[in-house]
Each structure stands twice: as structure tokens, then as C-alpha cells.
Amino acid sequence: MNTDIKTAVRPAIVMTILFAILLGLVYPVAMTGIGQMIFPAQANGSLVRDASGRVIGSTVVGQAFVAGRYFQTRPSAAGKGYDGLASSGSNLGPTSKALAERVTQDVATRRGEGVTGDLPADLVTASGSGLDPDLSPAAALAQAPRVARVRGLPVARVRALVAAQTETSLLGDAHVNVLALNRALDAAAR
Amino acid sequence: MTFQGWFLILAFIGILLALAKPVGLWLFALYEGRRTPLHRVLGPVERGFYRLSGIDPAEEQGWRRYAVHMLLFNAALMLFTYAVLRLQAVLPGNPQALAAPSEHLSFNTAISFTANTNWQSYGGESTMSNLSQMLGLTIHNFLSAATGIALAFALFRGFARREAKAVGNFWADVTRITLYLLLPLCVALTVLYIASGVPQALAGVVDVQTLEGARQSILLGPVASQEAIKMLGTNGGGFFNANSAHPFENPTALTNLVQMLSIFVIGVGLTWTFGKAVGNTRQGWAILAAMMILFLAGTTVTYWAEAAGNPVLHQLGVAGGNMEGKEVRFGIAASALFSVVTTAASCGAVNAMHDSFTALGGMIPLFNMQLGEVVIGGVGAGIYGFLLFAILAVFVAGLMVGRTPEYVGKKIEAREVKLAVLAIAVLPLMILGLTALSSVLEQGLAGPLNKGPHGFSEILYAFTSAVANNGSAFAGLTANTPYYDALLGVAMWVGRFFIIVPMLAIAGSLAAKKYTPESAGSFPTTGGLWVGLLVGIILILGGLTFLPSLALGPIADHLAMIRGQLF
């Protein structure tokens, strides 16, 4: 046992240092170099800029939309909502009173906007990250009449925008990127 | 449940089965110490590492020496990470100027990453600097994974060798696995992740003025390089608090599939490697079949429960499945599948919040971990954990027919069975003991966010996850307190190394035995009967041990949920 320990000391220390350099510095820094070279846009967060070059968001990360003239994003438990430095779900369980109260309130808000029938689940539930960039097509379409009304656009036109922005995948659910949809909406209104 | 959902699940399984042999072959080459095409590039690095640390890779180690070297290496790595975290404020690579994590958080985190658990008592973006993520955490993601695979190799050698004293060289195993398997795969995966939208930058926060004119801060960092090994090494410690639910960690349905495949691929390959090592690949397929039966059963239950949704919300006028805590781009099926994959393996990454699953949907991840994470399991840890159950299963079969049990050519005798039981008993003792303690102590009861049975589930899930070295959470629990950090830290350490040492002792004991050829009286360990016995033993042991705790938590929660009783 004693020689087992003695023979282990040097490799344990030296290997820790060598692997720390290789895996903790060389690997991530080299990958950063490669990423910045081949895919600079994605490596730097897939940022979206407006005409003046100001950063207005990321195609990947969700941002809060609360105004009636925009398609609104899902409830968010990230900080006070869509806080990029505090990603989080609500972590409320299925029998949570707090969850039921929150959903009751959000359902009432949607009813007030004239949405009838059962609500799409994602419209009144918080995402896992609190930064979900998407809505389900149903949750977007449920908002189309309100958006059309506020903007004075024909509902069919707004619905067509949702359809145009809907992405489907065999590996996940159909979704609409809310930032892209709202930018398309702004462009259409002009 | 939808057609698209089942397509995803079946495609996932199909791809894995197709990868079992090629990955298993590559692992077998490393197991044997054979030359691979990558030696041309990385061979000098490997030899340099040996030279500087004074290692002769050809020197064979007995199980004790193998264990001692592994333990000292892991201890050194843990201390290194503790130092990096405590010095965070003075070290470079800290664009947000974050303070150092507290003593108890650093203690918990250093153990957590060393033990391949990656339990996170912290929120990554608000606690860890870029340097801490890379130097403190990413290295463990590689080396705890490499340690796990090395240990599996040692046990394989125990079965494969005849009248031998040694089970391999720990340093050679760890170095080869890291250089010729994990690192190259991670380079490829990192590039794929970056292309899909995962950031890889050393900058810090980007200020955004949103379309509505509000301010938002977006954090960039070396995310993709950590993401790649986080999944491949079944570690699960995310760059961000929300882990793989965060769009920067897991931006598309495709990256989601790749991440799930990464979690399982090495574990699946190792079943094939085991079969090859003991001279009959059907032995490996039999193990994989038993694992896949348990996996598919768990997936079906969770997918069904999540697709059925929460009746409490249906009452309020909400349609469909349970989307609380889930991301739209994944949806119900990909989230349910991910939760089962991550807990069947000891990964612990999450792409949806398990705490917000329906009661039964969340019970399966919990039960998966309580079974010992032997359904594919953590890299290395899964197969060596499974082989402990296989030893028990042949023992039970031996009792029934009244013959000395044998497994893959080795007689299983009292010593091996005792050691296997010792290793397996760690799980219930630690999980149930610590959960019971925390359910009565004030410091323990301060933790849960949810009330009622779900609050109990949060405590049970935390200790299950820690002891099983998973790292996922019912994250409503406030765990960053001295009480939980300390107790969970101890639980993770015991859950890792108190299983490993008896397991290595079994490897040493088996290696010393003669080869016993199969005879007419041997219980066949390749056919359907054997697969059924394995599944039965795992379910009966796990079920009998943990059913009472599940009745108090998720099952009570489910009954309350269907009655509409809220807490």
C-alpha cells in the first residue's frame, strides 16, 4: 500500500498540471480560434443588428415582448423575465398552487383579448430556460387577431406571416421564432 | 403522443444500435492499447505526458495500485479545482468581475465535477468566470469520464484475464481514452455546435436593446467546447443555469438529438467492447438488450405522462401536454426522451425542468437514478455498475439450480458476491438515509420550493441524483446552503468512490481466477432468459428498495394531481 501511494504522487500532480493545460486552456482556446475563424457570427452569439448597426437581439436567445402590437413571448422565470444573466425555469410542480394561480391569471388576460377555446399550452407556461425564443404556431395564431387589430392589418395577412415564419422539424416541434416574426411584422406594416 | 414523437424515439434507438459496434471496436483498440490512426498526430503528446510524469505505460498494476493511483489523481484534480474556484476573483478570464464562490459552494462543486456528477448548486452565468468554466470545470468533464472508462477497462480485464495479477495501467488507460477518444470527438462536436448557434468566445456580456426598447444582457463564453464534453462524458454541468434548455447550449432540435446521442454513445459502445474483451460479442448484445428494454419502458411512461399533461391546467382551459418548463423547439417528445436519457445515463444535463414534469413523468427520471444508472449509464460507470448486477443475477440463478454460478468463464464465489452487494448497498443507504435526515431537520426542510409531496420529491431527487452521480435536479430546491452543499458533497463522493473500490477489488479477484469453460450445466448468459433475469433483478432490487420513498413523493403527488388538490 505504501509503495502504491509513493509511486502515485508524482504522476498525480504532474498529470493534473499537464491535463489542465491541455484540456482547460489549449482545447477551449483553440476551439475559440477555430470558431471565430469559420463561424464568426454563430460563435459570437448570432446577434441581430438593425439598420444603424445597433444590436437588437440574437436569433438564438429569446427576448421579452409584452406590447399588444407584437406577438408576445411565453411567460419567463429568468429573473424578471428574459434576463440573459439569470436563465431559469419556474420549477413549479404539477400540484403547485403558485403555478395554478399564475396560469389562471394569464388565461384571464388572453380571454380579455378575445381568445376563445382551449389555449395552446406553451402560451401560458414558462419555458425551461426562461429565454425560449419561440412560440408554437398555435400560440402565435391565437395572438394574430389582437396583433391585427392593434396594427390595423387584415388578420389573414398576419396569419400568413406566422405561416411564413413557421419552421418544422422531424426531431422537434414546429415553432416560430418570435423576434423574426415581429421583425417581419414591422417590415410588413411599413 | 404523436407520430413525429415516436419517430424521434425510434430513430434515436436505431442510430445508437448502429453505432454500438463501430464505437465498441474503437474502444476495444484503446482497451488493448493498440495503435490507432490518431497516434500519428497525438502519439508525441501521449509519450510526452508519460515522460514528464515518470510513467511507464507498459507497467501493469494490481487492483490495489490501480485504485490508489486513480484515487490520488482524482484527489489532486479536486484540490486543483477548489483552488481555481476560490481564486476566481484574482485570476484572469473573468470579464464579469465575479467574486469567488463560497467555501461550501467550491467544496460542493469540486467534488461534484470530480465525481462525474456535475450537480450544480450554482447558476453558471452568475457564478463562474470563463477561466473557472474552462480550467476548473471542463478538465473534469474529460478526466472524470476517462476515469470511468478506465475503471470499466480494469473490470473487463478482470473477466478476460486468466490467473493474472494485474488489471492494467491506470495512467495509460486515462491518457489514451482522453487523447484518442474524447478529445478528437469533442473537437468535431464543438465545430458542429458552433455552426448550429452555440457561442464560442472569450468575451463577456453583450448589451442588447430589444425591439421593444428594453435592455437585455446576453452572456457569451467558451460554451461550445464545454458543451461537447459535457454530454459525451455524461457529465452534465452546464455553462448556464438552465443547462441544455438554454438556447445557447442547445439551439436546435438537431443539436438536441446530437446531445442525446452523445450521452449514450460511449456507454453503448462499451457493452460491445465488453463482449469482445471476454471473447463473445453476444454477451455484450445481451447486456445492451436488457438496458434497452428498461430504457424503452421508461421513455414510454414519461412520454405518455407528459403528453397527457396536467389535469389541473386542463381545468383552467389549457390544451394538451405539459409545457411548463419545456422549450417549444423541442416539444414534449424530445423533452421527455432527453429526461430519460440523461437519467438512465449518469449525465444530468437537462433540456427541460424535471421539477415541473407531471408527477409520473418526473418519477421515471428519479427511478432511473435509483436503479443505479445502469441503463446504459455513465461512461464506464454504467457498464461496471451493470456488471455488479450481472454478478448478482448469476448468483440468484445459481441458487435456483444449486450450482456454483459462472459468468463469462469465471466462477462467481462468495467474495465477489459480497463485494457486489457492498457496492450496491451504498445507493439505498445513502439516498434513503440522507433524505430521511433532511425531511426532519430544519436545515433540510428549508430547501424545497414546492410544498406537499412534491417538496419531499425535491429532497429525494437531490440525494438520489448526488449519490447516483447524476447531477440533474428538481431544481426548485435551494441547494446552495452550507447544509445541502456539505451533505450533497459527501453523498457524491461516497456514491462514486465507495462503489469503485469494491468494484476494483472484484476485478482483481476475477483476474486471479482460472478460466472455467462453459459446460452443459452452465447458465447461459446470452439468450432471452438471461436478459429477462437481468431486467427482473434490477427492477426487483430497485423497486423493493425505493418504492416506499416513491409512494411518499411522486405517487402521492400524482394522486393529488388527478384529484386537483393543490399545495
Image: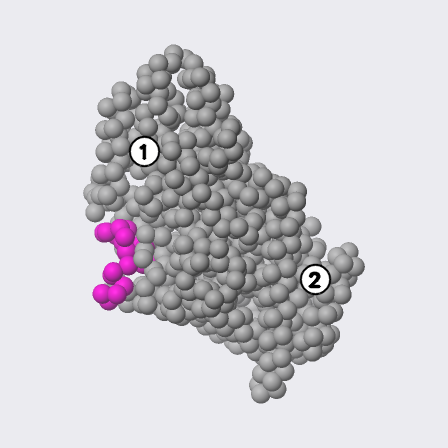
What's the colour scheme?
Answer: one colour
Q: Which element type, helix, strand or loop, lies under badge 2? A: helix
Q: What residue type is disc 1 on?
A: Val
Q: Does the magenta stretch include residue A26?
A: no
The nearer-to-camera label among 2 and 1 is 1
Q: Which mark is residue A124?
A: 1
Q: Is residue B448 magenta?
A: yes
Secondary structure predominantly adopted by residues drawn in magenta:
helix
Q: Name the residue: 79% across, 59% down.
A: B40
* Disc 1 chain ID: A
Please indicate whether residue B322 sits to the left or right of residue B386 in the image: left
* Location of the N terminus of chain B (image quadrant): top left
Magenta span: B441-460
Along the line of sight, the residue nearer the viewer: B315 or A120: A120
The residue pinned by badge 2 equals B30
Along the line of sight, the residue nearer the viewer: A59 or B67: A59
The answer for how far apart the CA atoms under marks 2 and 1 are is 51 Å
Q: Name the residue: 45% across, 64% down.
A: B89
Q: Which element type, helix, strand or loop, lies under badge 1? A: helix
How crowded pointer 1 is (Cα within 10 Å; few <14, some 14-19, many 20+) is rated as many
What x and y, as percent, mark residue B527? 59, 53
